[in-house]
Amino acid sequence: MNKLPTPEDLRVFIAVVRKSSFSAAADELGSSPAYISKRIRILEEELATRLFQRTTRSVVITEEGERVYHWAQRILDDIDHLMQEVSITREAPRGALRISSSFGFGRNVMGPAISALIARYPLLTVRFEVFDRLVDVASEGFDLDVRIGDEIAPHLLARRLASNHRVLCASPAYLARRGQPQALSELAQHDCLVIKERDHPFGVWKLRVGGEEQTVKVTGPLSTNHGEIAVQWAIDGRGVVLRSIWDIEGFLQSGQLVRILPNCRQEANIWAVYPSRLSNSAKVRVCVEFLQEFFVQANVAEQLK
């Protein structure tokens, strides 16, 4: 009779599937490629099947490997839920959490929030990653994605962490040189700082004007995939930027930026998004509840109104 696979070997296998690489899986798990190769070889022997087709350049999952992958996810989820049910997880959650977010919000808000999370719950371990693209939490193995924007796929679960909206602004120097736009459509004749960040449509700004949604196609000599860079360009007088109020509130208060078209805004609330398979995960629930509390105590929610 074959020995049963261990949860650790299943975690190694899932990491290799996600990364399509033994070395990348080793980096993620903090181990060596030799250890990863050994655990996969043992798992294949225990299951009496080949899980990957391996060459010097690639690692490709087999058809049998695909079936094992789906079962491995279910088994590990069930183990996590079992441990949470019979432990004091709500008071002292434990285990690993993979959390993702965007560049600017990740650095300025989520970084301090996760530091506070670990201070309260030292039995948790967190791997936090930031991206300039929208993360597929289910297929990329994340437990939680903290994102800005209200368009969320129906197969995902989401809890709102704080209210937020995006506003239009520019520097006093830019407005003195180019004039104040009086209507959203006039932005087509202005230098606009276009951001390609996560799921934002590139060069298309959709805003609510009163109770009506309007769209304007914008262009300009500068564009970037990093919102903080665009904000700095706006402060330097390079053009108009559409940015979250949490990001530019301080610059508006200092006068470095001036809000334009104040009747225009774009709803972009802050959400915790996670796969439906983690709907009963106590450690995810505790993390989400902590983030909601943290934002209130840190006055993030108030700043974003």
Image: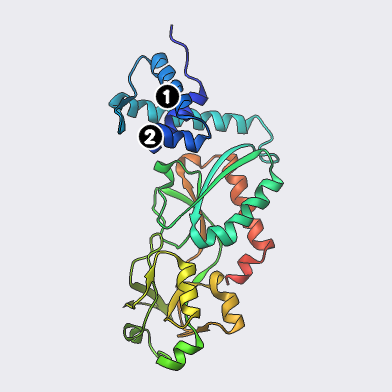
Residue at the image point whose x is 46% and y is 67% from the top: 227
Q: Is residue 179 visible?
A: no
Marked residue nearer the N-terminal end (1 or 2)? 2
The answer to whether 87 appears left or right of 221 in the picture is: right
Image x and y of residue 4, in percent: 47, 15
Numbered circle sitting on residue 37: 1
Residue receiving disc 2: 21
Residue at the image point whose x is 40% and y is 59% from the top: 198
The answer to whether 94 appears left or right of 127 in the picture is: right
Furthest residue to the front?
56
Instruction: Please state which amino acid type lies under the numbered disc 2.
Output: Ser
Image x and y of residue 85, in percent: 62, 32
Instruction: Please state which amino acid type lies under the numbered disc 1.
Output: Ser
Answer whether labels 1 and 2 touch (C-beta < 8 Å): no
Element class at badge 2: loop
Quarter in which the C terminus is drawn? bottom right
Can you say whether 252 is above or below 26 in the image?
A: below
Can you say whether 229 is above or below 191 in the image?
A: above
Residue at the image point whose x is 57% and y is 78% from the top: 251
Image x and y of residue 145, in percent: 49, 51
